[in-house]
Image (spheres, rainbow, N blue to C red):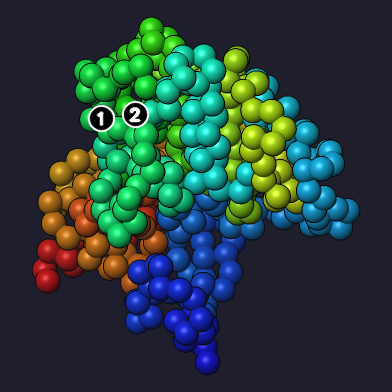
Amino acid sequence: MDTKELAANYIMNTYNRPPETTLYLTHGRGPYVFDEHGKRYLDFVSGLAVNSLGHCHPHVVEAICKQAEQLMHASNLYFTEPQARLAKRLVENSCADKVFFCNSGAEANEAAIKLARKYGKKYRHPDAHEIITATRSFHGRTLAAVTATGQPKYHQGFEPMVSGFRYAEFNNLTSFAGLVTEKTCAIMVEPVQGEGGVYPATAEFLQGLRNLCDKYGLLLIFDEVQCGMGRTGKLFAYEHYGVEPDVFTLAKALGGGLPIGVMAARDRAADIFVPGDHASTFGGNPVVCAAANAVLDLLTAEGFLENVARLGAYFCRRLLELKLPGLVEVRGLGLMIGAEFDGDAARVAGLCQEKGLLVNCIGGKILRFLPPLIATPAEVDEALAILQEACAQAMKA
């Protein structure tokens, strides 16, 4: 059996991967991946915002190999240098005072949910356990995280959902304020909604949420799993808004391709957990933390994030200049870009793949571009030339 047959026979059917159109990838370098036939593709999916430094970045690979020769796992019964160093660097570069390590964005958000509930009971009200999240949001696939997700399609078949979540309209402060009760412990939002369609928050909205949380003693939680770690042209998306959360979550790009999650907190929220409240067997694994430290080396290098911001602006400007047929709107922040069409964007994405560009379609009408942060203007031009061809071909069909 070939790889596709093995996958079809032995892996649960949780991903939409029709064998006739799904690529079998064998290796990658920089912004490119290669299939079993050696065909090269410009990867603007980036592992869904994981491969922010492209594929197999030599600095990250070197850090992984070096650590793997020394200590691969120790459990959190013991201290390890890569973990402690990574924690220090995350705190020094953010508003956080302490961090918790886990293995994914869903795990990080689960940790934030648990922390918020304990915080609410301790500091607000004995029954303060409810968290207000946004419509169109996405916070993960585990049961509490998917309940926090404000998209009913992800709840279907898994009812009853976890109690204690309420949903307000994204970018509508009045909608959020109207749901606050004595049972509320936190508000949780993505500064830029990713899976929901690439919708950036407005500064007025996030500042309003900050004021609302301060007024009622609630925690403000930012899910930066997709929009964090340089994706928007700042290390953290909240930096664009002048608003600091009490808690924020990270994952995806931080590990450079290895699984990692972080729940970070400040002030009183940073000291809520005590031994036994929460834990992770693999969280803060030495090899993964070595990779994350290497990623931070590059993200914090002089001029790196400024270049991401410039390239994002260039991408959006060039995309609009193409005047693509059916293009309704271009939105995003940095190199987290959504292009909404009035027609079948999935067909356009399929044609792009045939022509050598990988791009993700969400919701049937939106193309989500998540280029590696190390991409060049020439590679953006290459991607847009392919997109233009694909759109022209789609119109003829």
For the point 43% across and 44% down, which residue is it? 144
Is residue 337 rendered to the left or right of residue 271?
left
Kindly report the distance in space between the C-alpha atoms of the residues bearing marks 1 and 2: 7 Å
Residue 308 locus on image (x, y percent): 48, 36
Identity, as a three-letter code, of the amino acid under mark 1: Ala
**Quadrant (top left/top right/bottom left/bottom right) for the C terminus:** bottom left
Quadrant for residue 360, please give it. Answer: bottom left
Q: Residues within 10 Å of mark 2 (few under 14, many from 20)?
A: many
Residue 295 seen anywhere in this rendered image of the structure:
no
Secondary element type, mark 1: strand
The mark found on residue 132 in the picture is 2
Frontmost residue, 366 versus 286: 286
For the point 51% across and 81% down, which residue is it? 10
For the point 45% across and 60% down, which residue is it? 42
Frontmost residue, 187 versus 368: 187
Secondary element type, mark 2: strand
The mark found on residue 168 in the picture is 1
The mark found on residue 151 in the picture is none
Q: Are marks 1 and 2 in contact (CB under 8 Å)?
A: yes
Residue sticking out furthest to the bottom = 1
Residue 26 locus on image (x, y percent): 56, 73
The correct choice, above or below, for 248 with respect to 320 in the image is above
Residue sticking out furthest to the top = 215
